[in-house]
Image (tube, rainbow, N blue to C red):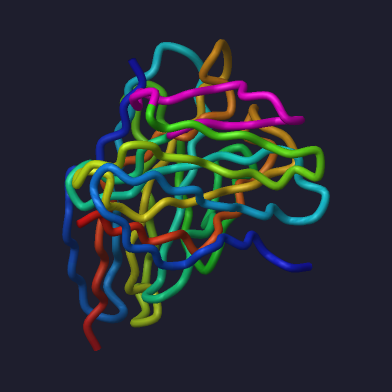
Amino acid sequence: KAGVTQTPRYLIKTRGQQVTLSCSPISGHRSVSWYQQTPGQGLQFLFEYFSETQRNKGNFPGRFSGRQFSNSRSEMNVSTLELGDSALYLCASSLSPGNGAYEQYFGPGTRLTVT
Amino acid sequence: AQRVTQPEKLLSVFKGAPVELKCNYSYSGSPELFWYVQYSRQRLQLLLRHISRESIKGFTADLNKGETSFHLKKPFAQEEDSAMYYCALEADRGSTLGRLYFGRGTQLTVWP
């Protein structure tokens, strides 16, 4: 079974630009979560989608947004990029969120560098 | 608020020695606790979760609700155990259901 895939793997953008990252979950998985990983803050939860609905959102500004499509693929968008947005963005998928019953499978991440 | 603390950023042991990676949490409900591992150049993957009470690659972890701890232990460390280990908590209710809270991670190095 193919794992979680994320595209692109690497991205360099300039301050003020916007970026869209894509995540394809494992086939059959309906929940997709996004995390930001930085050396300073570690792994921080961005948001989670289930059946095309955002069910959970972390403490990030409104510049960070996302969506999920009917095939469970998800995208996240960051507008008006800032230097501090440079990070590894991880996507994770699971059959269903909650209760610890379903393992979250992580993708390889997208390394975003903002200059 | 939910919080996961891993007090050791770095931990080094020799091959064959016991290893314990500490994890403490704060949460008012009944959390689900996990250990994730990231080997060099590999993606983050689940090592074990307290709900299944299993031993993976010789590692075990016991949830101690009194001490709010979920320490990861292995009696005899191997060189291939060298990796970054993250403790994570999942809330059991409310708007944060399904969200993982991660500790800052502990880099384990096992010397030959």
- Above or below for A112 versus A47: below
Quarter of the image containing the N terminus of chain B? Answer: top left
Q: Position of residue B69 (x, y in %)?
A: 34, 33
Is A50 colored magenta in this rendering? yes
- Residue visible at 34% across and 44% down in the picture: A43
At horizontal 55% and vertical 59% (from top left) the residue drawn is A107
Q: Position of residue B33 (x, y in %)?
A: 48, 36
What's the magenta region?
Answer: A46-62
Q: Is residue B103 magenta?
A: no
- Horizontal relation, residue B12 to residue B4: left or right: left
Q: Quadrant of residue B7?
A: top left
What is the residue that sits farthest to the bottom in this orientation?
Answer: B112
Residue A67 vs A71, above or below: the answer is above
Along the line of sight, which residue is nearer the eye, B93 or B29?
A: B93
Residue plotted at (55% across, 34% down): A66
Rendering quarter of residue A88: bottom left
Residue A50 image point, x, y percent: 70, 30
Question: x, y percentage for residue B17?
Answer: 27, 73
Q: Is residue B98 above or below residue B29?
A: below
Which residue is located at x 17 percent, y 50 percent? B8
Considering the image in quadrants, where does the C terminus of chain B appear? bottom left
Q: How many marks?
A: 0
Q: Nearer the viewer, residue A32 or A110?
A: A110
In the image, A103 versus B32, the foreground residue is A103
